[in-house]
């Protein structure tokens, strides 16, 4: 008699063909992990559909048989949202990677979820446009994955997170129904905003099969300003002063000494000996007014730091930008041994709260006796605490404690436990803590009820987001 597993595998193969299914042991191993330190179950199979109809048929099969489904594309999740908490199948959307339509006058592009962000922006650059969301993993991350987690990135200080750039979605529900949310227009007022609800849902509602995204003309002219600082208070006050002057950078990044040291060779900058933090700002303006704007920002920063560099050369700016994007991978060189892992914390506070929050995080580092490096998006208050730890049970317990410590600091300063990485399985207890502190735990109950409406048989990405509190 054919087992349920074999029956489901055979049905899916009939839908998409043997060439678009992975069932062998070696092929499935990479899917037990994503970019996080979290391991999951080995999938029964990996399905690589080529269109929405194949996704629909696969989901119908899984829904009828109550088979757990996890959606995945680039595998760049840092919270374990794209690994399986229990046996089931993975739908990999990497075969859906096309740009379907570009409309410059109406400022949108229509594309599929498996399209990588850098590929999208390389295409748009030909027309002098770009798609602003800019996670550090943009070379590997995809449209679908970044929609799923409401990713942010380096340009969020000016352009906001992914949710600000989504006009509409084509979406496949767990029962196989295909719906369309949103429009091709820049504004609408027509019922509940299901698009906003799906963005950030981490694959717990269904599968994105198409996205209508807003685009923006490339900045006319850009310059980069770099400042070196002795303490985080001066960095925070410098950033606040720039904003108070009515200037919003495209990018505003800070790096501590350890992170800075890991990318020193790539930066090719002369770094003063006193430096504990570096601040990088990208300023854009018209050709005529950029120079004045750069000098205005330099004057502001000079009140807090004696060493300010202005860079106007595009090639040099690109090199520094790529060095910052590669900061996490560069930190791997700072590990004490090859078995040590680096867990990237991701909390956020209002920008004016950043100096105090950072100081408290530094104090917690000392208390927990951990090696931690700090960098992040200072313009929007996003702190990445990169925790070096042994990958054994003792090391992971230390990580969990420190993650809770910095989460409580963020909550105390009116922030959140997750800025741009999502919740996955790493942060579900932290999310519970955030709403408990707000005296709003019923909000989580409402979220669970919404999940049931989309996915009544609970087949989509089980075990993610919610913490089962005893």
Image: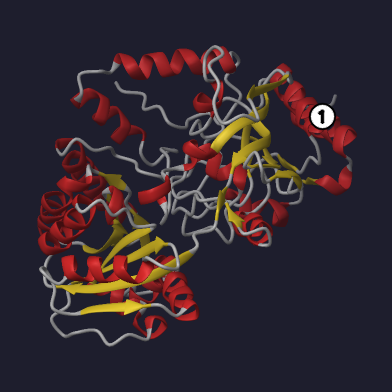
Report whether residue 329 is seen: no
Q: Secondary structure at mark 1?
A: helix
Percent x, y for residue 49?
A: 79, 40
Judge left or right: residue 142 versus residue 288: right
Query: Split into 4 quadrants, where in the image is the N terminus?
Result: top right
Which of 188 and 204 lies nearest the eye of the viewer? 188
Q: Is residue 193 left or right of residue 366?
A: right
Residue nearest the viewer, comparing 249 with 5? 249
**Residue under the point 25% across and 30% down:** 434
Give the left or right position of residue 108, taking residue 164 as reference: right
- Image quadrant in which you'd find residue 68: top right
Q: Which residue is most to the front?
A: 288
Judge left or right: residue 279 versus residue 75: left
| Residue 258 position within the rendered picture, expressed as x and y whole percent measured from the top left | 26, 73
* Residue 131 to residue 450: above or below: below
Q: Quadrant of residue 440?
A: top left
Image height check: is 164 above or below 253? above
Q: Circle 1 is placed at which residue position?
A: 53
- Placement of the C terminus among the 4 image quadrants: top left
Q: Could you tell me residue 158's position as x and y percent?
A: 38, 49
- Could you tell me if residue 174 is visible in this image? yes
Residue 404 at x, y = what percent? 23, 42
Q: Residues within 10 Å of mark 1 (few under 14, many from 20)?
A: some
Q: Nearer the viewer, residue 148 or 77?
A: 148
Q: Residue at x 74, y 21 (%)?
A: 176
Q: Residue at x 35, y 38 (%)?
A: 427
**Residue 437, picture quadrant:** top left
- Report the front residue among 236 and 102: 102
Visual colour scheme: secondary structure
């Amino acid at each position: 008699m054919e087992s349920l597993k074999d029956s489901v595998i055979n049905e899916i193969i009939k839908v998409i063909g043997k060439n678009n299914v992975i069932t062998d042991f070696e092929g499935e191993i990479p899917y037990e992990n994503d970019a996080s330190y979290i391991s999951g179950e080995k999938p029964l199979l990996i399905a690589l559909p080529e269109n929405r109809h194949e996704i629909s048929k696969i989901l119908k099969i899984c829904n009828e048989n109550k088979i757990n489904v996890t959606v995945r594309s680039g595998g760049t999740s840092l919270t374990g949202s794209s690994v399986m908490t229990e046996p089931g199948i993975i739908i990999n959307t990497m075969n859906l990677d096309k740009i379907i339509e570009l409309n410059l006058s109406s400022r949108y592009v229509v594309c599929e979820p498996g399209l990588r962000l850098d590929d999208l922006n390389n295409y748009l650059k030909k027309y002098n446009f770009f798609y602003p969301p800019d996670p550090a993993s943009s070379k590997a991350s995809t449209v679908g994955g970044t929609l799923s987690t409401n990713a942010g990135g380096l340009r969020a200080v000016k352009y906001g997170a992914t949710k600000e750039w989504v006009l509409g979605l084509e979406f496949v529900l767990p029962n196989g129904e295909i719906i369309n949310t949103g429009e091709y227009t820049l504004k609408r007022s027509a019922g509940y905003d299901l698009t906003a609800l799906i963005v950030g849902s981490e694959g717990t509602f269904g599968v994105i099969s198409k996205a209508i995204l807003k685009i923006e003309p490339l900045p006319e002219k850009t310059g980069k300003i770099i400042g070196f600082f002795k303490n985080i208070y001066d960095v925070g006050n410098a950033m606040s002063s720039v904003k108070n002057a009515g200037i919003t950078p495209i990018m505003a990044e800070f790096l501590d000494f350890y992170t800075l040291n890991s990318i020193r060779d790539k930066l090719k900058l002369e770094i003063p000996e006193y430096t504990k933090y570096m601040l990088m700002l990208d300023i854009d303006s018209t050709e005529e007014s950029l120079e004045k704007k750069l000098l205005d920002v330099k004057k502001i920063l000079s009140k807090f730091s004696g060493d300010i560099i202005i860079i106007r050369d595009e090639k040099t700016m690109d090199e520094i930008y790529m060095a910052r994007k590669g900061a996490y991978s560069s930190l791997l060189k700072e590990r004490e041994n090859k078995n040590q892992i680096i867990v990237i914390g991701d909390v956020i506070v209002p920008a004016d709260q950043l100096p105090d929050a950072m100081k408290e995080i530094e104090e917690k580092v000392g208390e927990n006796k951990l090696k931690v490096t700090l960098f992040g998006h200072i313009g929007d208050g996003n702190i990445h605490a990169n925790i070096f730890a042994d990958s054994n049970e003792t090391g992971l317990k230390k990580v969990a404690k420190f993650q809770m410590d910095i989460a409580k600091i963020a909550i105390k300063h009116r922030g959140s436990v997750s800025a741009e990485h999502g919740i996955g399985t790493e942060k579900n207890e932290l999310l519970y803590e955030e709403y408990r502190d707000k005296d709003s735990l019923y909000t989580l109950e409402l979220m669970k009820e919404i999940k049931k409406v989309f996915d009544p048989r609970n087949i989509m990405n089980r075990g993610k987001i919610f913490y089962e509190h005893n």
